[in-house]
Amino acid sequence: MKNAAFILRFLADAAARGERSALVTLTDVIGRASRAPGTQMAVSETGAFAGSLSGGCVEAAVVGEAKRVIASGIAETLRLGDGSPFIDIKLPCGGGIDLLIAPAPPVAIIDEARRLLSDRMAITLSIGRDGSTSVELQQGIGRSEWRNGVFRVVHHPDLRLVIIGHGEETRALAALAIAYGVGVSVLTPDKTLANTLDASGMEANYLKTLNHSVWLKTDRYTAVVFLFHDHDWEQALLEQALQQDGFFIGAMGSRATQALRIEALHDRGVAQANIDRLVGPIGLVPATRDPETLALSALAQIAMHYDEAYNTDRRPTISITADAAE
């Protein structure tokens, strides 16, 4: 789920202010819905909240019910939409959602979950019908689901993007990625650009040589994009990136440029299996002619690859009826 760290931070901040809170988890979908099982929302006793469980049609009701559960201190399950006793709350899609509202999530558990995600490790939050909550490392991709009476929510670290390049394409992609909520790191041989981005609060480092960089470090939740017009800057850094774990490594340029790039990597002795990981030309929109469209095209492609790799709930939100199950 995107922004899991943000929701967990909301809970931690509420606790630090002395506010009671609840963690609301979408556990089941009846018919169709805009969110998948495992989607979560955090609610404070003040009525403030983080996250969403719909396109905006049920959040007010969820906040009201969560405040009631916070006051009672007793976890509850709740259905909204189709099949719900709350006949005035309808989902536009005509479906229904089941929620598990757990009051007073343990601060130690929330802090541990935040630490693990910050350390770029996947987690499973297990929430019982009684509101009991635990956290553990998630092995593999996993999926959010009921298991032995406990709902297990899988969270993967948020997407991180390393941009290596210069020019307006680098500036445009960095700005768009920040707006999307991605952690961004820029490596550039343009000292002015590095200083400008650094002054804006973005992580930016100045590349002084064509060699490998100590700043190029990735994990399996990191995408790397090369945005050079001067392709001499690419080869050593491409070689370095392809030896690491990034789930997406792409480079700007035409098909002819990509062919030359691959030939140069062969000449450097890069293994074919690593070369095959290189995406180029980048972007979902072919042959873009301005930095902003290229940025949008590339970020959309990266988000698509991340979603395909780590969205644990890419499944139809259509329930199986009891009769069909039998």
Image (cartoon, rainbow, N blue to C red):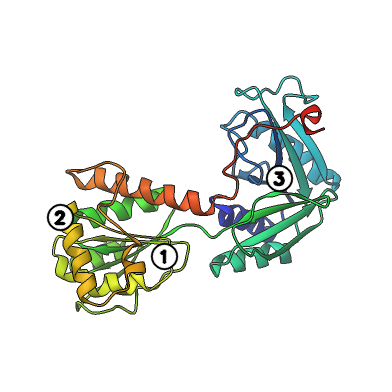
Which mark is on residue 246? 1
Whether the residues at callouts 2 and 1 have beta carbons within 8 Å, the answer is no
Q: Quadrant of residue 60?
A: top right
For the residues labelled 2 and 3, the Cα–Cα distance comes to: 51 Å
Instruction: Identify residue type, mark 3.
Output: Val
First in sequence: mark 3 vs mark 1: 3
Q: Residue at x 23, y 79 (%)?
A: 211
Q: Secondary structure at mark 3?
A: strand
Residue 104 showing in the rendered view: no
Q: Residue at x 15, y 70 (%)?
A: 232
User: How would you rate the neighbour count of disc 3 (Cα within 10 Å): few for under 14, some for 14-19, many for 20 or more?
Assistant: many
Apparent side of residue 76 relative to residue 243 in the rendered image (left or right): right
Residue 166, given in percent of the width and then of the height, sits at 20, 62
Please name the residue that numbered disc 2 is placed on.
Answer: 256
Please name the residue that numbered disc 3 is placed on.
Answer: 24
Residue 253 showing in the rendered view: yes
Apparent side of residue 6 relative to residue 304 in the rendered image (left or right): right
